[in-house]
Amino acid sequence: MRLPVNVQMCPTCPFRDDGWTEVRDLLVRRTLTEGSPICHSTGKGALVRKRGQGKARLCRGARDVALQYFAAIGVLMAPTDAAWEAKCQGSVIA
């Protein structure tokens, strides 16, 4: 089962300029070499409990980094969620 991606970055996302930027480089490395991280504000073990959305979701900021990178190297046709989903389904999207 694939987890859904946050629609937008959470208020403390490391990929926001006013977020927890100290861990951004680590998350970029993990995103591009291991997989999409779960948003720290979602799910059962949310670090930011008052902002927790209940159900775990993938980090929007990390997904945006992955979209830009994979589009730049030609793996995705465009840096969009639609292109990501099409690639996962084995389709081609312009």
Image (cartoon, rainbow, N blue to C red):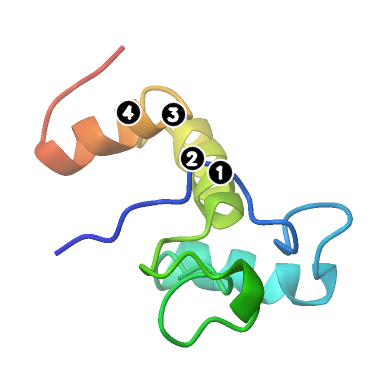
Residue at the farthest bottom position? 45
For label 1, the crowd category at 10 Å Cα-Cα, with few meaning under 14, some 14 to 19 and many 20 or more, is some
Q: Which residue is mark 3?
A: 80
Q: Which residue is mark 1?
A: 64
The type of residue carrying mark 3 is Thr
Side (left or right) of 78 relative to 51 = left
Residue nearer the viewer, 20 or 67: 20
Marks 1 and 2 close (CB-CB < 8 Å)? yes
> Cα distance, mark 3 to mark 1?
8 Å
The quadrant of the image that shows the C terminus is top left
Q: Which residue is mark 4?
A: 83
Q: Earlier in the sequence, mark 1 or mark 4?
A: 1
> Cα distance, mark 4 to mark 3?
5 Å
Instruction: Name above or below for residue 74 compared with residue 32.
Output: above
Instruction: Name above or below for residue 63 compared with residue 86.
Output: below
The type of residue carrying mark 1 is Asp
Instruction: Name above or below for residue 62 compared with residue 72.
Output: below
Marks 2 and 3 close (CB-CB < 8 Å)? yes
Q: Earlier in the sequence, mark 2 or mark 3?
A: 2
Residue 67's tag is 2
The quadrant of the image that shows the N terminus is bottom left
- Picture coordinates of residue 18, whole percent (x, y): 89, 57
Residue at image x 78%, y 52%?
A: 16
The type of residue carrying mark 4 is Ala
The type of residue carrying mark 2 is Leu
- Picture coordinates of residue 5, whole percent (x, y): 40, 51
User: What secondary structure is marked by label 2?
Assistant: helix
Residue at the farthest right position? 18
Residue nearer the viewer, 52 or 3: 52
- Picture coordinates of residue 85, whole percent (x, y): 25, 36
Residue at image x 10%, y 35%?
A: 90
